[in-house]
Amino acid sequence: MTDTITAAHDVTDLGLATEGIRRIEWAEREMPVLRLIRERFEREQPLAGIRIGACLHVTTETANLMRTLKAGGAEVFLAASNPLSTKDDVAAALVAEYGIATYARRGEDRDTYYAHLNAIADTRPQITMDDGCDLVSLLHSERPDQVKEVLAGTEETTTGVIRLKAMAADNALGFPVVAVNEAQTKHLFDNRYGTGQSTIDGILRATNILLAGRNVVVAGYGWVGKGIASRMDGMGAHVAVIEVDPIRALEALMDGFRVMTVAEAAPWGQLFVTATGNVNVFRREHFAVMREGAVMANSGHFDAELDLKALREMAEGHVRDARENVQEFDIGGRKINLIAEGRLVNLGAAEGHPAAVMDMSFANQALSAEYVVQHHAELTPQVYVVPEAIDAEVARLKLAALGITLDEMTAEQKAYVSSWQHGT
């Protein structure tokens, strides 16, 4: 660690930095794409002089993204995007070892959370990097004078993209934002494989329940829901899916899952996992008919997917910690269990996505930051998909790092697929 701490910070304990360094280095071994980008950034300095304000989950993988941005010449400032997702040892290491200004404490209350966001805003960032749109929302709602100083932003997750598209539709978005979540090398892998595995990891760490033979309800069949459902099925669970989109519901049915309404699923399920990006999926009337010992977890970005206000009212104060990261709500003698306070279960009760998956997601973040620095003058205030060239480059680098070589089309094959004259 460095002898003198110069980076601004508000973290739980700088003494945890040594452990944080070890874990950041372990994650780096599984992130070869980001490492290759960092090596190029060190040589080329594409982000030189740029202030980047980031609101992301403070994990080992995020630490390696911050190191990459700093290597590219950026001045980086980081706050947590969720009160329970911060790893305190990582936050300490970012400050003490890597000299990155970090504002994050696991379990921070709402006031501290927004104080940290405001600390990032105080740096007057030129690029925003969000996971959930909270930083962008803060700038637009409370600091409109700063919006014009922002060249562009990037957004990591589905919930944030939904909010940004709503802002754009209302002509309220003041600068262009690249939706990293929409990159194929992000949502096809991070959302499906990463969340699928890490959600189960969080549930099992918190509860140690057996999934085989258990009735599991997955609310939402987007990429996150698909990943969760497939992995629950692989663990031997009986899986039902709740959907409002008829095409996704049909897909879930043809993937071998039962499709139910919320009302049908509430008394049937034993484990409930939300992944919709919406609000109050499970409500008072559903809690009233859930089985004794039912377990609820959320894999959406915000804890609003469960009507926790109603759950607390129904328990009338009869709430206790049944296990670490598990709250037990006693509703007239019938107990319902909630993991990680209804916040992101994979980060609140585990370590989040495997580093090998976040390697692709954060490679997209780093390359998208480089892209908007180079092209912001050509962009208008709207939500953009990650350029196809960046998406393809991330996939190419990942395959190369895994030692996989692809075939190329022959000249004949290229001519065939580009011609309309060939037929039966």
Image (tube, rainbow, N blue to C red):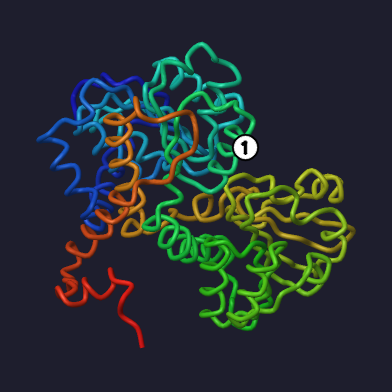
Q: Is residue 252 above or below residue 327?
A: below
Q: Residue at x 66, y 72 (%)?
A: 216
Locate residue 401: give its quadrant.
bottom left
* Image spot of residue 34 (x, y percent): 24, 48
Decide if residue 339 is on the left or right side of residue 412: right
Q: Is residue 93 visible?
A: no
Q: Nearer the viewer, residue 21 or 223?
A: 223
* Image spot of residue 61 (x, y percent): 33, 48
Decide if residue 215 is on the left or right side of residue 235: right
Locate residue 323: give its quadrant.
bottom right
Q: Residue at x 40, y 52 (%)?
A: 183
Q: Residue at x 31, y 59 (%)?
A: 356
* Image spot of residue 75 (x, y percent): 28, 24
**Circle 1 Cα neighbour tier, 10 Å, few/some/many (<14 / 14–19 / ≥20):** some
Decide if residue 396 is on the left or right side of residue 307: left
Extreme residue toward the left, this view: 43
Locate residue 186: give its quadrant.
bottom left
Q: Is residue 243 above or below residue 422?
A: above
Q: Is residue 80 visible?
A: yes
Mark 1 secondary-structure assignment? helix
* Image spot of residue 274 (x, y percent): 65, 58
**Residue at image mark 1:** 166
Quadrant (top left, top right, bottom left, bottom right) of the C terminus: bottom left
Q: Nearer the viewer, residue 291 or 277?
A: 277
